[in-house]
Image (cartoon, rainbow, N blue to C red):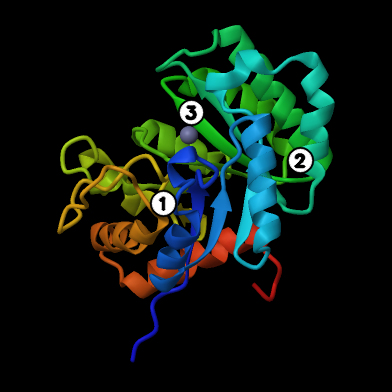
Amino acid sequence: MTLPPTLVDIGLNLAHDSFDHDREQVVAHAVAAGVRHMVITGSTLESTRAAIDLVRSAPGTYRCTAGVHPHHASELQEEHRAQLRELLAAPEVGAAGECGLDYFRNFSPHADQERAFRWQLELAVDAGKPVFLHQRDAHDAFVGILRDYLPRLAGGVAHCFTGDARELRDYLELGLAIGVTGWICDERRGQHLRELVREIPLDRLMVETDAPYLLPRDLSPKPSHRRNEPKYLPHIVKVIAACRDEPFAAVAAASTRNALQFFGFPATA
Ligand SMILES: [Zn+2]
């Protein structure tokens, strides 16, 4: 019998209400598929608290992030800063974020997004924790802000990378790790990523589902509903390995090693 691979899903919105009715089953299916560790994304103060509670329920399986997504930047007021600092200091939290800039949807004005991003980078520096980064249609502003903090930051990962060659090269030059999702499984909009993914050094690569979002488009048979789940991570890794002309086991082992270290999973995990 061959054991399933050990993988780490570094971006999973497990506190999302679409998982409320069957969360334990979703996790059991993922673990059976070899996804032994998961990093639960915090995207608001409330979802960060929920994520920390989930980590406490199974500390060997989970870590989480603590942060405010750029969509919610306008909700982050001065009085929340101390709360965020406290959440970030929790031992369950492996990174600050999800934070960054999103000029694609612009749910919060740019000035609010930039202020919230700087606050969180500053808090990450103080906490000595790396950052889980989101960027869409805001590359130059994003890199401009990030550069001010990078020398003092304990690292960063560009989560759900979908950008172009210039963005990838900038991130690699800045020393960031790159998170790849099932976006790469989309034959149309993921085509450029299938080529670019070869340029990511193995020691900078991490993998994620971003569930319940971004269901891989090429699953067969097609699931009956649109909800993405962490159990599909091995499929994403298979596609990444094929694009890179590397064995699945090599991509699995490297991305797992990178993720366990980056998010500070206990050595025995
Ligand atoms: Zn994101």
Please tell me which residue is depicted at 48% across the width and 39% down the height of the picture.
17
Q: Residues within 10 Å of mark 1 (few under 14, many from 20)?
A: some
The answer to whether 166 appears left or right of 52 in the picture is left
N-terminal of the two: label 1 or label 3?
3
Q: Which residue is mark 1?
A: 200
**Numbered tag placed on residue 88 in the rendering:** 2
The answer to whether 76 appears left or right of 180 in the picture is right
Quadrant of the image occupied by residue 167: top left
Q: Which residue is mark 3?
A: 135
N-terminal of the two: label 3 or label 2?
2
Could you give the CA–CA distance between mark 1 and mark 3, rounded to whole angstroms? 18 Å
Please tell me which residue is depicted at 41% across the width and 46% down the height of the picture.
211
Of badges 3 and 2, the one in the foreground is: 2
Please tell me which residue is depicted at 20% across the width and 41% down the height of the picture.
191
- Which three-letter amino acid code belongs to the residue tagged 2? Leu
Of badges 1 and 3, the one in the foreground is: 3
